[in-house]
Amino acid sequence: MSNTTRIWTAIDFDLDGKQADYLRLPYSSNMSAYGWIPIPLICIRNGRGPTILLSAGNHGDEYEGQIALIKLAREISPSQVNGRIIILPSLNYPAVAAGQRVSPIDEGNLNRLFPGKAHGSPTEMLAHYIDDVLFPISDLVIDLHSGGRSLEYLPLALARPGLTPEHQEAVRELLRAFDAPVGVLTDGEGGGGATTLYAAAEQRGIPALTTELGGGATLSPVGLAIAETGVRRVLKHYGIVPDMAVRETNGCRLMRSLGRNAAVYATESGLFQPFAAVGDVVEAGQEAGCIHSYESPLTPPVVLRFPTGGMVSCRRFPTMTARGDCLYNLMTDVGRPL
Amino acid sequence: MSNTTRIWTAIDFDLDGKQADYLRLPYSSNMSAYGWIPIPLICIRNGRGPTILLSAGNHGDEYEGQIALIKLAREISPSQVNGRIIILPSLNYPAVAAGQRVSPIDEGNLNRLFPGKAHGSPTEMLAHYIDDVLFPISDLVIDLHSGGRSLEYLPLALARPGLTPEHQEAVRELLRAFDAPVGVLTDGEGGGGATTLYAAAEQRGIPALTTELGGGATLSPVGLAIAETGVRRVLKHYGIVPDMAVRETNGCRLMRSLGRNAAVYATESGLFQPFAAVGDVVEAGQEAGCIHSYESPLTPPVVLRFPTGGMVSCRRFPTMTARGDCLYNLMTDVGRPL
Amino acid sequence: MSNTTRIWTAIDFDLDGKQADYLRLPYSSNMSAYGWIPIPLICIRNGRGPTILLSAGNHGDEYEGQIALIKLAREISPSQVNGRIIILPSLNYPAVAAGQRVSPIDEGNLNRLFPGKAHGSPTEMLAHYIDDVLFPISDLVIDLHSGGRSLEYLPLALARPGLTPEHQEAVRELLRAFDAPVGVLTDGEGGGGATTLYAAAEQRGIPALTTELGGGATLSPVGLAIAETGVRRVLKHYGIVPDMAVRETNGCRLMRSLGRNAAVYATESGLFQPFAAVGDVVEAGQEAGCIHSYESPLTPPVVLRFPTGGMVSCRRFPTMTARGDCLYNLMTDVGRPL
Amino acid sequence: MSNTTRIWTAIDFDLDGKQADYLRLPYSSNMSAYGWIPIPLICIRNGRGPTILLSAGNHGDEYEGQIALIKLAREISPSQVNGRIIILPSLNYPAVAAGQRVSPIDEGNLNRLFPGKAHGSPTEMLAHYIDDVLFPISDLVIDLHSGGRSLEYLPLALARPGLTPEHQEAVRELLRAFDAPVGVLTDGEGGGGATTLYAAAEQRGIPALTTELGGGATLSPVGLAIAETGVRRVLKHYGIVPDMAVRETNGCRLMRSLGRNAAVYATESGLFQPFAAVGDVVEAGQEAGCIHSYESPLTPPVVLRFPTGGMVSCRRFPTMTARGDCLYNLMTDVGRPL
Amino acid sequence: MSNTTRIWTAIDFDLDGKQADYLRLPYSSNMSAYGWIPIPLICIRNGRGPTILLSAGNHGDEYEGQIALIKLAREISPSQVNGRIIILPSLNYPAVAAGQRVSPIDEGNLNRLFPGKAHGSPTEMLAHYIDDVLFPISDLVIDLHSGGRSLEYLPLALARPGLTPEHQEAVRELLRAFDAPVGVLTDGEGGGGATTLYAAAEQRGIPALTTELGGGATLSPVGLAIAETGVRRVLKHYGIVPDMAVRETNGCRLMRSLGRNAAVYATESGLFQPFAAVGDVVEAGQEAGCIHSYESPLTPPVVLRFPTGGMVSCRRFPTMTARGDCLYNLMTDVGRPL
Amino acid sequence: MSNTTRIWTAIDFDLDGKQADYLRLPYSSNMSAYGWIPIPLICIRNGRGPTILLSAGNHGDEYEGQIALIKLAREISPSQVNGRIIILPSLNYPAVAAGQRVSPIDEGNLNRLFPGKAHGSPTEMLAHYIDDVLFPISDLVIDLHSGGRSLEYLPLALARPGLTPEHQEAVRELLRAFDAPVGVLTDGEGGGGATTLYAAAEQRGIPALTTELGGGATLSPVGLAIAETGVRRVLKHYGIVPDMAVRETNGCRLMRSLGRNAAVYATESGLFQPFAAVGDVVEAGQEAGCIHSYESPLTPPVVLRFPTGGMVSCRRFPTMTARGDCLYNLMTDVGRPL
């Protein structure tokens, strides 16, 4: 089997102007023998300059980035642009349409399937297209995430360390340009590890950034503002939209994630009552919350404690929890010892 | 067919002491020919005094009331009691276990099925038991709700008007005793109308109260505190737990709901960006929010406006919305003209 | 429980002009606590005159009527009207949206649930609203059907006999005004019997007509033309749109259905190869078709024969068949002996 | 709505000879607008004499009765008969075809839905037909059950007490004629109570008997032999097949069921290890079994005890169990004190 | 893992005579630990001569080929044969049994999964067997398709270009022998591309042909006749059944498909009203159809136009459509410029 | 993609003592972005000595091994141990929790997916972990199976032939030490072949044994005793628990399985009535059972015969059967000719 994508689009990435079409992902189903899944795609190109790939909706139930990119796609005109902006505001479209993290077609979690497969499931085909077709023409990658239905996040940007010192510096420059309140360096441990979109971009040497901007499958006004501002600041900083009006930097606090050994996981199933909030600084041994039994209400609750100190980056959002669910992740300032 | 319930319990409601068992709801399934669904039930009885029925988990994804009642059931000892406390902390147990509003067994929304049926679906059988067996032995009814997955609520208590002037006064006394920040009088229009647990209690002349204490299927610490305090204040006020230590009244602002003609409903499907928050006071014609298209991102958003003025009592929680979803409900102070 | 509908609409049926809204069918689900199902509704009213109720999409996968009524709703202006036209082009909206005969919400087949229930399942609530709210304000009822996914029909109109001689004559007048190529009198045996929309209209003494205009869940241009012409001819005939330009009558052949004893049903499951087409005149004992086994291909096919003579009114559309499926229905000219 | 069944059959119950067709249960689905569910039905009639109704497959995963009646239907010729034998070997046909206790179409447990509804769900319509059409023409009713997937039974026959002393004696005569090793008198407590087929037959004054002949959704050779012998003995005893060759009586031990307060129910979910077998005589307080946790294997098992003494009539078959599942039922000899 | 198939059969392909068995595809499920899926297979062999592989039911809802091959398998006797005929009339058997395009077991679309996997999903294992076991013993391959539920096709045969000039000529000879009214050369663009059965046969250098013979999941008598005649003509032409009585050639019009850029795709979801039929010759810019909104009926319909001229080879069959569905494909005579 | 597992555990396999945690299998779902599936794991280590890997619940509905290992894990203390015991009592945990053979998450049959994939589905990831992480640290492997829901087995142990003479002897030593009544040598034909856990262990040169100890998804006391005794005997024999009190050998009869050509498969779908039991010695041509039609009860049953002689090792358990189901497998004494 060839490694050539079967996905196509009516957009010509080499044309100037604003074009809107879809990634046309062939999906031959009972109801549509020759149909395709329409993944919204906007390309705005003008003059010479770098190409930025902007995506949201990688997980379908994360909304700050989707709305920020939809608004951006409407508002920017080609005449403002030096270079090329490729926007995929609702990337895993079947998941977005279902209001779910994963695609209902193949249960595919797009951010766990990179670098994908040319002839795999629909979600694998999509990952492959991004990695194989879009990354080679991109100079910068921003993939906007939020906590989704199961998590609540302190708004922050994240990046991986980079493959080389130059790459590392390019990544940090992108974090500074984006100017989220917090910028987190991570290797993805406890999350998607090497299987994510931005990890695949890193593998190709591209400076890439992701975010976490709220959660609960609702819309955070603060998170939305960070997404809108951050992307605009990046577009200006790299000269892609040189006359973009943006606010000054507020300064981005550089932190690093503490990985799975610093996380709190549910040891029982039941109703989770948290004792700490996102952004709280906690100590090792401090009570993190308790789990009540709805099956046997007179059973005493199970109390959980933080295994180490740090700042809470995210917390489980739903009260209902099952053994193995992540209840808290922690982070700490870069350079600070554990 | 007789109208006699098939539900039973090992608890003897006439015995003193603290008993814990289940409503045993017969459910003859592929996997269990003679089994029953175990709905947790606690009865604490001592001496002579009124009977209060306390329930939560009527909708399975509403948690403040469930945790408040689980904690109460653990903490109260019979020796504190003059009368009887019947506690059902996770009422529609199959819905609770599924983390859903409705039961996965029969898609039953318990709070839309009163007065139920003795030989109906499991959820109808449960409604019938409450109405036919528990209400006749209850002097007071409190059914604790929250917004659940689809709504966010300003924390408040609600009651129906009552059947007679005396009933009306008894209801208001219960609202004052519970002492939520806001107490709302409603006929249930736009919600469950006459099909709810507390409407069925009203039909039997019982003073009954319900609450809305948060939403999003997460846990609101403020809502949890209101539930815990309110129930304890009621237990003391009516002499059921005469020595209960409770805080003083903060005063309960009496309001009335404005019904479906004052509500804002989604006119399109898409991503809902709200412009007002719960508790906001809004004017007629004010922008309420907009709906973005994720299918066709360059399409201008649809802007929605409030049809009348009032205070926002609840708002849709998920960003994803479909035509017909309720986005906002409004309320106003009692006595204030529309 | 009261027998009052919980369905509402923003349309005021007593106002002149063209109004478009929905039947707002309350449906309190996991994703929408206070939402409603939006069933499209158009009301066009002007001056004094009779009220006609026009519906399609009673079964969601039948399309000629839906498109005919959508086009009619767009094209007619109030100034053309003397009286009132109430249009429900996609009546069982959840079924229409799913492309199915029955509603995916409650598996409800609307045309088997009349007269419905005020507090039943969504589909039962809808039947009740039509019967209890719309029929009392309607003078004429036309409910446009086609064969749907499982049947292919010779295009025809159908009516029930009527409750009285006057009612019977009014029904035949409506059939003549509609002017389908064939008009069939039926008591619904082998189909929906007394549980259909037009049978419920008959019970209220309203002249009512239904159609079958194609099938296979595709669009028949011939069927679409009959629907469009028929409705327009009726609107003119009864003076509701007096200046409507319509074609002359082609003459409607009056026939009667022959019921289930004249039908051919599958006696085995397998692949159905028909030997007759809709509109064919067949004799008793004639070969109707055969059923091939896809499981055991070398097994000889089962040959089926017509139990009586007549004209084929409809035939099973899918090749795949199961024991008990209706393969053919027959009809004969009125007055002709069996 | 009329109370007249919509089910029909090509069989004429008043004709002599052996006829085979179906109860034709109209079911208008997405795939078959005018189709019916084919419930196999055999009628063997000759001369004058009583009518016996024989059924199995009331629960779809119980097989001894189904095979016994299929063999009987093949083997008996009309010339042997004085009277009428109506055989429904696979009564809830959709459940039988699915290999399940309940129907996959409407989740209907036929033996919990008597006396049914003429216009209800398919399973309710079936119950109504049996009660409203078949019972009035039946003099004797035998409905053959087994334990099904979730239970293992000591082979036995069961009957309800009867409405009058004469009815009671007629029931005991039927038990003696059937001659199972054990005959149990029961009011159905802990099982289907008044909602079963044989309870509905009792309401009409008909002597009726049911059985439990094995379980686990497999075939018990012993149970099959009891079913075949018992039915043949009854056919001979009542003169319906006067020349039937049958074995002599072995004597039927008359017992009574001890109801739900003598049952053992699972108090936890987990893996059930039983300590007693069907037919064992147990004492109050004796260990009945234990439940191991597969989630937390180091947790000590929960030990369950019999609440009273008696003989084990049935036991849960699957090892996997959930709180509320029935693990054991007990019975005792008639006349023996509790 | 080895690349050896786990599929087996009781048929010995090297024996003379007519053998019927199954491809026995091991499928270890909850209900059958050691069971296999029985894919009907007939082998008719006699003397020396070429081997032809005949298949249908590759997509389960396409019937002309299935019935043609079932009839052929019944009718041909080994004594007529010089060589070997391998017939798989219902190839993706689980899809056939479900009446669907794809297998319900693994959602596998067999004609998108070649060359398959020896240890993949059931559908992948089946593709691998055909490619790895059957193709190496086949000299000719015919895989009979129709439009299925979602498409209506002008009856035609299709072939890929071939790997070499000799292969190309062999393919055209096969097209001429089959003698469909139209023979289309295609590279599969817009359909299955290189992942189809006949593309895999091409990769092995085998002359291979496929068909499209109707659609809508119903049976086209014209399409059935083409299938029966075409296969018989091929069997005679290649000397496999030398005395087969066949009709003379009608002449096959050689065309080529115009690919996805000449196709019309749905730009909106809604109800599709087509303005052209299969076989029509259309011009660039001509109206192809319109899409009506059933959600908002007063919205003007969206009109679609043909992007280029050509003859309509297929059209979407269901009226219900979603954005991305293929509405029309075009073809043109070979040699004619675009 | 790296081949490194993403599964982790809090257990340190190099520490002495009894540790209990889980294989933490990352599963990023709609409800748990960073959660893991908790597969119970116990490690008991002390001193120097061999490592034995003990597993059950590879198929979720097989219970003798699960309960045996749960009890063992509770009872053994580190002080008894010389070496290391790694216990996975409920290996495919999602399947166990569902009471199914295969995982409900990905329909994965763990014992058909070895050697697994580091980045595959959850079940593939689990197979990979066992093969890639646990096998390299194991000296002995015992994977306890039973018949599960679809099979009934004569209690026996099974082993594959081994890669070398030394390996072969080590395998036989393990069989002798386990001392099941019967020990069967097999290459897995008709079952999982080379895709099973113990076949993968064989590939790594480890002496490995599996069992079949009952079936029907119930608990066999005999099978449980064999599991408990066998494992304890092995622990003593290899010096891992040197002071374990065990019974003497009863002698293990060495047999070999006869493969798929000696098996009986269902040739029709229907109700299976077996004529032989597990452990019976049968002759070629002997009647094995018959299949009754529940659809057409008057159709004569299909009689099946054994294709060869041997002893019945297993039999289909459910009465309901479908074409292709395995009804019987046979075995014979080692050395005895066919």
Image (tube, coloured by chain):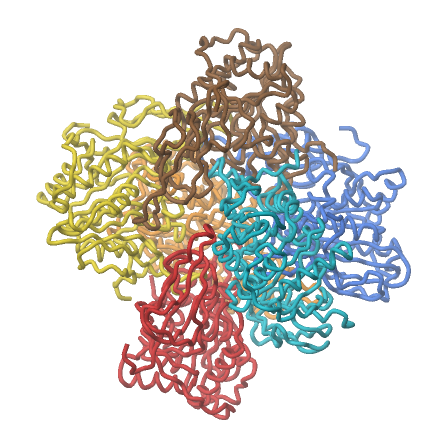
Chain colours: A orange, B blue, C brown, D cyan, E yellow, F red
In which quadrant of the rendered view does residue D12 lie? top right
Q: Residue at x 53, y 81 (%)?
A: F72
Q: Is residue E337 above or below residue C173?
A: below
Answer whether residue F107 is visible to the viewer in this image: yes
- Residue E110: x percent and y percent? 31, 49
Identify which residue, C117 or D254, lies in the foreground. D254
Identify which residue, F176 or B151, lies in the foreground. F176
Quadrant containing the N terminus of chain D is: top right
In which quadrant of the rendered view does residue C118 lie? top right
Identify which residue, A91 or B196, lies in the foreground. B196
Q: Is residue C272 left or right of residue E13?
A: right
- Residue F198: x percent and y percent? 37, 74
Tag count in the figure?
0
In which quadrant of the rendered view does residue E170 lie? top left
- Residue B44: x percent and y percent? 81, 62
| Extreme residue in the left direction | E166
Q: Is residue C62 above or below residue B214?
A: above
Answer whether residue D300 is visible to the viewer in this image: no
Identify which residue, E242 or D227, lies in the foreground. D227
- Residue E117: x percent and y percent? 29, 58
Quadrant containing the C terminus of chain D is: bottom right
